[in-house]
Amino acid sequence: MLSREEMFRFVQTVLGVVDYDHEPVVRHVLGDDASAEASIPVENAVRAGLGRFLIDIVEKEPWRLTRYSEQLWLTYDKSPVLQKLLVRVQRITGLPESVVNQSEDLQVLRYGPHGHYSCHHDMSPDTIDEGKDAPQIATVAIFLNDVTRGGEIAFPAANRDDIAPSELEKYWMLEEQCQPRKACTRLGGVVFSPKKGDALLWYNIRPEFWNDLKRKETQRQGFGEQSLMWSSVHCGAEVIEGEKWMANMWIGLGPHGHEEL
Ligand SMILES: O=C(O)CCC(=O)C(=O)O
Ligand SMILES: [Fe+2]
């Protein structure tokens, strides 16, 4: 059964629609006189028009979704330029070559007008707990052009003293508040306006846990929540004018390089 609140959440987290007018959707699905306590089975909600609502958004206003961008992946080993990039990133970050070389393919992103990416972590507690082979311990984001207007990258939870590292509830709340496109740069923290040639590095997983990851000692209860770098939550703000090009390197912690950490 979906209550009113759960329906908002369902639309946002399951359907991935972060910007919408709550009331008309609720009225449409739960009926005009839906009280705050009314609830409805998921199948009925879908039958009553939630599916159509999603299709309309995808077809007509896709920028209301969590992410509105185009992307492709480039393989490092096929390109001398990208090989050079790996060496440079290794030198700048001081991370072992064997770790940097575990990076997944380079992701190139293009955002046009309205393009954006809502608040997220590049790794989630669940994906850390799944114990995949090369967890992405850090991200290097490289900005490839100057954006005419908009397109900032924001870290609303970074560098603030009103959230203690152990206050996970507050991080969750901030991440939820940060979902709508317009909220991305309005919640404080660190907001960075991309410039061609700039790069940002952040950790997705706290360095003191990297060795546990390497040794696959991740089975203990709550490891994902403990090891996640909560302050790394970030969003790509809406591009208001022009376009935004960037490349993401996800630095993985693969099977080699353990000794060097
Ligand atoms: O668009 C941005 O600035 C951020 C992109 C991003 O966070 C990602 O691709 O994971
Ligand atoms: Fe990201």
Image (cartoon, grey):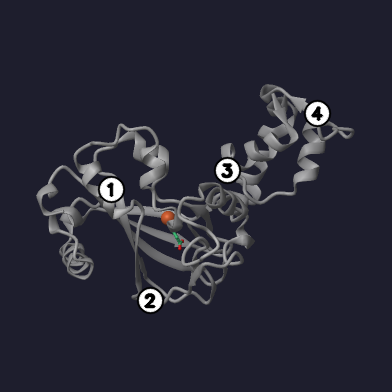
Residue 189 lies, in percent from the top left, at: 52, 67
Q: Which numbered disc flags the more N-terminal residue, 1 or 4?
A: 4
Name above or below for residue 146 compared with residue 81.
Answer: below
**Residue 66, how many percent across, how many down?**
55, 49
Q: How many labels does the image show?
A: 4
The residue identified by callout 4 is 38
Q: In which quarter of the image is ligand 1?
A: bottom left
| Residue occupying image coordinates x 38% and y 41% | 224
Foreground mark, 2 or 1?
Answer: 1
Identify residue type, mark 4: Ala
Q: Where is residue 61 in the image (x, y as percent from the top left)?
A: 64, 51
Tell me the SS state at disc 2. Answer: loop
Which mark's residue is nearer the viewer, 1 or 4? 1
Q: Earlier in the sequence, mark 4 or mark 3?
A: 3
Residue that numbered label 2 is attached to: 196
Which residue type carries mark 1?
Phe
Circle nearer the N terminus (3, 2): 3
Residue 200 higher or lower than 178, as above or below: below
Residue position for label 3: 16
Mark 1–mark 3 distance (CA, rounded to whole Å): 31 Å
Q: Do the residues under discs 4 and 3 have CB atoms within 8 angstroms?
A: no
Quick one: quadrant of the N terminus?
top right
Marks 1 and 4: CB-CB under 8 Å? no
Q: Is mark 4 on a helix, strand or loop?
A: loop
Q: Which mark is residue 62?
A: none
Q: Which residue is drawn at 35% across and 36% down?
A: 129
**Residue at the spot x=76%, y=27% of the render?**
39
